[in-house]
Amino acid sequence: MKILRSCIFPFAHPRIDQGELHKRYEQLQAKYEHTRLEKMMLVSLSDTISKSNLPLDDRTGLVISTTKGNIDVLEEDSNFLESRAYLAELGNHLQKFFGFKDNPIIVSNACVSGILAIAVAKRLIRQGKYDRVFVVAGDMVTQFILSGFNAFQALSLEPCRPYCNSRTGINIGEVAASVLVTNNPGELTHESVQIIGEASCNDANHISVHPAPVKAYLDV
């Protein structure tokens, strides 16, 4: 764990080693500069595509999962245009780098973005749109993210203790990861798992939702 100083409190959070990220990104020999999140995703997805040894043809799709995307470009010290914060821009840069034939599908549904992206990939294959789909997901720690969760009083000043009676909150971390979802057993590795089923629903119960008046429940 490392400590990031916010304008209010220092919060415990895991961060990606920037030196290691830069070294891995330099090996990709990109023709132009990418944002930190894009670098994280490029490094991860490049490794997955390389190990799969599969062609990026019209039967191969790309699904991108992220909650906030390039939100850090809106900070005052950013060297990128604010338009880079649009999720479509993130998708365009990843597609352009690897050469996917179709535009990527971007899934941004808060905390469940990652697992929903897997579900979307599975559905695209079952519908016959693709034979395989690469899924890449990523988010990073920024002042914007920390201030938002701190407004909910949800962050812990120390490593979190899930399910513990004395827990004091959550930790916000950053990561990028990628997987291949395919309908061809010949493209699988010994580490592969089967997606047996998936579903999603919205119960409208969240820490950010204000309690409804009791009268509303009585009226219903």
Image (cartoon, helix red, strand yellow):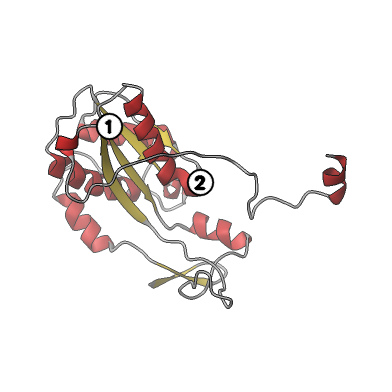
Q: Nearer the viewer, residue 22 or 168?
A: 168
Is 151 positioned to the left or the right of 88 in the image? Answer: right
Q: Residue at x 53, y 70 (%)?
A: 163
Residue underneath mark 2: 110
Is 169 above or below relative to 133? below
Q: Nearer the viewer, residue 161 or 146?
A: 161
Residue 205 placement (x, y as % from top left): 65, 49
User: What is the three-letter code of the residue carrying label 1?
Assistant: Gln
Q: Residue at x 48, y 71 (%)?
A: 160
Is 163 positioned to the left or the right of 66 in the image? Answer: right
User: What is the three-letter code of the residue carrying label 2?
Assistant: Ala
Is 106 above or below relative to 1? above
Residue 33 placement (x, y as % from top left): 25, 43
Q: Residues within 10 Å of mark 1 (few under 14, many from 20)?
A: some
Outermost front residue? 196
Q: Secondary structure at mark 1?
A: helix
Residue 95's disc number: 1
- Name the quarter where the C terminus is drawn: top right
Residue 70 placement (x, y as % from top left): 41, 45
Q: Residue at x 75, y 52 (%)?
A: 211
